[in-house]
Amino acid sequence: MADARSDLVFNTRQLGLYRKPGSWRKLELVVKAPADLKIEVIGIEEGSDLSLDLQLESVVEGVYVSGTVRGLASGIDIRTLEPLEREIVAEIQELFVYPDEEFDSDDELYSLDVERLDFEPALRDAMVMALPFRPVAEEDDTEFSYQTGDSAESDNEESDDPRWSALKSLLDEKKES
């Protein structure tokens, strides 16, 4: 059962949406992030600010919620292991069905708890799915050298390894022809 005091639980009756198809409300809120909005290398810290820009529309089957959620994620660059921060924007388009509605759909649907819409599970699903699986720093101004792990300062293609000299000579011949 949803906690009625949570910032992420909306009372559809108070919003004028409970079983009133065609009615809608726009909500712009800043709420605190719930726990576990993360994957192994990046996540949104519990208690940090999330900006919600939502539209709740009453439909025959329940309440349709659409809009965006924004938050600041922090983690590590998987390539350099340096700390990074990135704004995460998740699009929301979910139907919260009334408990007495039956669907033959294979889709998992969110359910209203009588007149309360608990938005936290939908927010969690959308934000975690929006997190980058392999986050890398966006300041990718320099070429990354996979041989040394350092940023390459020049386009020096010469290698000190003599094993590559035969290949280099073949490449030079191909360029000349």
Image (cartoon, rainbow, N blue to C red):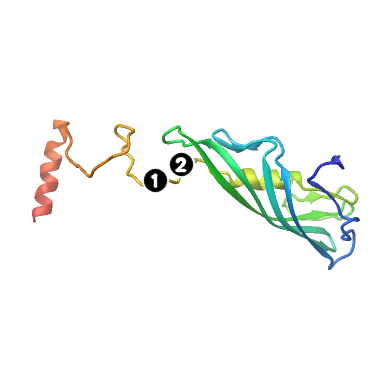
Residue 112 location, x and y as percent?
84, 50
Q: Which is in the foreground here, disc 2 or disc 1?
A: 1
Q: Name the residue beneath numbered marker 2.
A: 136
For the N terminus, the image quarter is top right
Q: Image check: 177 left or right of 122?
A: left
**What type is the residue that disc 2 sits on?**
Val
Is disc 2 in contact with disc 1, using a CB cutoff of under 8 Å?
yes
Q: Quadrant of the C terminus?
A: bottom left
Left or right, 175 with respect to 144, comes to left
Which picture quadrant has residue 7?
A: top right
Find residue 67 and report its image quarter. Answer: bottom right
Circle 1 crowding by C-alpha within 10 Å: few under 14, some 14–19, many from 20? few
Quarter of the image for residue 39 reads top right
Q: Residue at x 16, y 36 (%)?
A: 164
Instruction: Please provide percent x and percent y for residue 16.
Output: 89, 60
Q: Residue 37, how many percent across, how many down? A: 65, 38
Q: Relative to the observer, which residue lies in front, 172 or 77? A: 77
The residue drawn where x is 85% and y is 63% is 60
- Residue visible at 18% across and 36% down in the picture: 159
Q: Amino acid at mark 1?
A: Asp
Number of numbered discs: 2
The residue to which callout 1 is attached is: 140
Residue 114 spot, x, y in % from top left: 90, 49
Identify the mark at residue 111; answer none if there is no mark: none
Q: Nearer the viewer, residue 2 or 174?
A: 2
Cα separation between marks 2 and 1: 9 Å
Indicate the secondary structure of the residue bearing disc 1.
loop
Instruction: Determine whether the residue tagged by mark 2 lies in a helix, strand or loop.
Output: loop
Judged left or right of residue 170, residue 75 is right
| Relative height, residue 111 to residue 82 (above, below) | below
Assess disc 2: are there few (<14), some (14-19) or many (≥20) residues with their C-alpha within 10 Å of its C-alpha. many
Residue furthest bottom as drawn: 22
